[in-house]
Image (cartoon, helix red, strand yellow):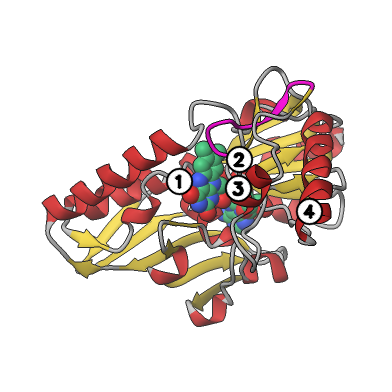
Amino acid sequence: MHTIYNKLKENIRGQVQMNIIIKDYTYFKIGGVVDLFIEPYDVESLIKAIQIINGNIPFYIIGNGTNLLFSDNGYRGAIIKIGNYLNGINIQGNTLQLGAGTLLSAASRFAAENALTGMEFASGIPGYVGGAIAMNAGAYGGEMVDVVKKVVCLDYSGLFYELSKEEMNFRYRNSRVFDENLVVVSAELEFKAGLKNEIIGKMKDLNQKRMMRQPIDKPSAGSTFKRPAEGFAAKLIEDCGLKGLRYNGAMVSDKHCGFVINENHATASDVLSLMRIIRERVHEKFGIMLEPEVRIIGEEL
Ligand SMILES: Cc1cc2nc3c(=O)[nH]c(=O)nc-3n(C[C@H](O)[C@H](O)[C@H](O)COP(=O)(O)OP(=O)(O)OC[C@H]3O[C@@H](n4cnc5c(N)ncnc54)[C@H](O)[C@@H]3O)c2cc1C
């Protein structure tokens, strides 16, 4: 690990640290020690970092850490954060070019300021553009697939690909990024011309709804489970009487049963135990097996 650390220090511009605690980089505030943590300052350094690491130690890409549950044992290998050093917004007509490390909220605000409509749904999602594209994030009837025009990705050998919306193979909270281990570097999103006041008004309404209905003031990873074909995860969980159920520091939010929150210094093991109980009970009562939406790293559900 020291050899790789030294090589990275010599060859890339960016933060390179050993033995950091990953919980500080996740919204859930959960996760143990990670061997190596890298946050490149530019795309060239990102490519170099991947080339140095790939084939030598395992690695995992993160964005803003808002959809992640890391093991209490952390991660043996390297975490590469595509963070706000790789942000940036350019506008050309109805199109925005966005760096993967741009906050979705900033991108939505920028679109609104320029009277571009289509991304209001995303203004309250706390991830970065890269994470949102990988996950095909969505809310209130909109999804990233609705606005993506093309995406610039890297593969693990450092080759660039420019992929169209169709080539991204977007599905519900999934995309080609996970099929082929791609890294999103930037994206072009396409909008329609709208009225600035209406767009801002819609964003305000949606964010107010979110504040009223979701436990956004508590550490979590957003919706814990995917929406099953047969209904809404939150409703199924609530109908099993699990609202407010705790497992040590982890709790089914009493504001929105779709969220498992870190109520009081929860560990990954607490969250996973609670998730298992939820799955069991929902399966017993409704015959539906909930699938996690949160990405679990270093543990099995
Ligand atoms: C309070 C709260 C509310 C939320 N509401 C919503 C919602 O309404 N709708 C919704 O869809 N989600 C929601 N989420 C979940 C989350 O915000 C989204 O999934 C978001 O898109 C993840 O972005 P991120 O940058 O945080 O990615 P991370 O959580 O860091 O990573 C998520 C996944 O994407 C991959 N990834 C990240 N960046 C890249 C990249 N540049 N290239 C390749 N892969 C990458 C990671 O490997 C990981 O598998 C919510 C989360 C919270 C905490």
Mark 3 sits on what residue? 234
Given the image, on which type of amino acid does mark 3 rest?
Answer: Ala
Which label number is shown at residue 257?
A: 2
Q: Mark 2 or mark 4, which has the lower sequence index?
A: 2
Q: What is the secondary structure assignment of the residue under circle 1?
A: loop
Residue 225, given in percent of the width and then of the height, sits at 67, 51
Horizontal side, residue 120 vs residue 293: left or right: left
Which label number is shown at residue 285?
A: 4
Q: Residue furthest top?
A: 264
In three-dimensional space, the C-alpha distance between marks 2 and 3, rounded to whole angstroms, equals: 5 Å
Q: Residue at x 63, y 33 (%)?
A: 26
Q: Mark 1 or mark 4, which has the lower sequence index?
A: 1
- Circle nearer the viewer, 2 or 4: 4
The magenta-colored residue range is: 248-256
- Circle nearer the viewer, 1 or 3: 3
Q: Mark 4 or mark 3, which has the lower sequence index?
A: 3
Q: Residue at x 80, y 62 (%)?
A: 287
